Amino acid sequence: MSTAAPAAKHNMGRPEPRLESRLKVTGRARYASDLPVNNPAFAFLVTSPIARGRIAAIDARAARAIPGVLDIFTHENTGDLKPIKYAPGGGGPATSMQDFGPDIHHDGQIVAMVVADTFEAAREAAYAMKIAYDAERPSAGFDADGVTQAAVAKKTPNAGDAETAFDAAEVKLEVAYETPAQHHNPIELFTTTASWDGDELTIYEPSQFMYGAKANIATKLGMKPEHVRVVSPFVGGAFGCKAQLTPRTGLVALAAKKLNRPVKLVATRDQGFTIATYRAETRHRIKLGAQRDGKITSFQHDGFEVTSRPDAYSVAGVEDSARLYGFGAVKTGVTIVHADRNTPGFMRSPPVVPYIYALESAMDELAVKLAMDPIALRRRNDAMTDATGKEWSSRSLMKCYDEAAAAFGWAKRSAGPGSMRDGDWLIGWGCASAVYPTHIGASTGRVTLNSDGRAHVQVAAHEIGTGVMTVVGQIAAEHLGIRLDQVQVELGDSRLPPVPVAGGSNQTASCCSVIAQACDALMGRLNAAGGNSIEAKFEQLGVSTLEEYAEFIPQEARPNPGAEPSGNPIKKLYAGVPTLVGGSRGKKNMYAVGAEFVEVRVHARTREIRVPRIVGAFAAGRIMNTRTAHSQYMGAMIWGVSSALHEATEIDRRNARYVNDNLADYMVPVNADIQQLEVILVAEEDHEVNPVGVKGIGELGNVGTAAAVTNAIYHATGIRIRELPVRLEKLLMA
Ligand code: MOS
């Protein structure tokens, strides 16, 4: 297959508007809970007000007496749901705590679900449930009594003798950082609708991986996956929290079966904080040793992450921080801290957001110690080979710095903290690197071309807001030699050919690779016939339509000859297990990179922080659509500002309970907080990452922002805050 650099016949890379944009802005796009089912009953969840202990007694009499109540589900009558093992990583259960009692594992655990004829009756009855608990004192997180610690199970990168190199270094930096818990808060809530037709179950649920959901729901209900269909046409924000099976889904399916009626659940905003996953708080200890000329001889990074009691979830971003620069020697480790909390999970750029924030802050602190320009320090340590000896397939980091610095006007920066001022406002300029591993997975897809030039593309992709529908349409149009408006893209249903989880920023690369392959095979058959036009070729073939189904397996995922058929990545994909390769796992490091530059203005007296200007330059291989790519980066950098200055899930440490579990108190930037935002798409070609040359971009843009903002705050004020988010009270108290 040679699809690495097809002639730009049509529209790859062009800023095509999203195919679904009109549907979305006119309210006609149907999300999972909008899809009509016949005569649905409505569910409402009851969640635990304690974080640790046991249910002592359940009194449902008052609830059952509410008119319209059909049934109430608790741990006492849901024993038909099968146990299922915790399996993070795409479609698997998001937590091993899948029971509804009597043991309570965390605050906000589901303990009951009321189903009624109306939503209002279900809600009223849920509030009328009387549940008595034997409460125990919970451990909320870091530093709490009763937590346990463990080293992360996976091996983390080590190279050379980092401790000796640190001791011998001319300049040393030893520093600690901390990031808070955060919740995704997608605007579309966690919803599930279950509908049975005999033994056939249909689940309507927003999903980042329909085949994974299908397989795991089947396990949960003790049925065969072929009897489960998952429908998820559009997803109203996901960011990692809709990639896995959470306890509500089996419960709703069981209720629908028992009541012999479709059941619809739309969980509330506050319930979303505890019935799904979140980004847990992290701590970092970093040691950097360098020569006076800036060459870093030693890098040590120890991460600490909070997780639940039973599940060893961790993001372990030292895998990526250890490779970002040509460190002389590297020593890394990750410790997980088990507390009485719900199990954390993937949240946009899971490993790199906290770990690269720490590294990129430390790089800025080292630059200050060396009296070196922060860009020059990165240039001094820019390397195509990491400390473990692994090469990068391509790396355009300094090109990103050069383009962003020029656009930002970095040359006009005066180095001293507090040296730039505009009246009462202290001006600070800071920068930081962004990096995200490039992933791709085995994928399948089907393309049908009609003699009139219209094509139909079928792929079980997930439109989580990224624009995948549009780029799949573009790649098909290009490889079939037709216009984009001649292509219809069908996605969002587990009856379509599977692609991996829409996570790890692999979806565009995976879907485009398989659809390009299908289109090329189809055109091969068509071109074997004579004739100059599509119509003439079809006439020669004597058919009016051609169909091609393709299976794409990335080079590094190809099974060894003689391997078990069950190890075949396509078989595994159909069974709901994606095989993602790339990043640091292959023979070469495969990463997208970027450089982010931020101007902050800090009021000299009130310490109010403003961000008038951000410039981000990103290199991520081939860009399929400059408009959707631009949107991804813009949204990501806005989220980065959020991480730097606003966002934190506040935890009541006495009760191990989230306090600001609503959109009024969970702080995010508003329009007034975001002013000038410039995105630069840096040209890069990489033919090793995958046939279409695409690196993922969905999780790149928000990686460098937080450190760029805090580095700029240091430059404005001379105050280094090492604990996110930086709110003005931290600057006032410093
Ligand atoms: Mo993304 S957090 O890999 O769904």
Image: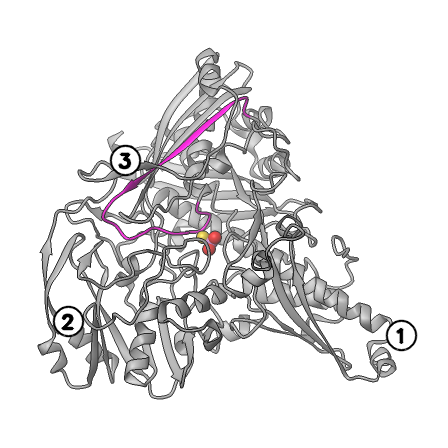
Q: Which mark is residue 127?
A: 2
Q: Type of residue at label 3? A: Lys
Q: Residue shown at 29%/53% (left/top)?
A: 666
| The residue stretch that appears in magenta | 327-350
Callout 2 environment at 10 Å: few (<14), some (14 to 19), or many (20+)?
Answer: some
Q: Is residue 686 left or right of residue 89?
A: right
Q: Is mark 2 within 8 Å of ligand 1?
A: no
Q: Which residue is mark 3?
A: 730
Q: Which mark is residue 371?
A: none
Q: Quadrant of the N terminus?
A: bottom right
From the top left corner, tell me how far across and down residue 269 is, in percent: 29, 63
Task: Identify whether 503 is placed above or below 18.
Answer: above
Task: Identify whether 319 is placed above or below 444.
Answer: above
Query: Reading the chain from its start, which is encountered first: label 1 or label 2?
Result: 2
Q: Which residue is mark 1?
A: 532
Looking at the image, which is closer to me, 71 or 653?
71
Number of numbered tags placed on the structure image: 3
Q: Provide the secondary structure element on which disc 1 rests.
A: loop
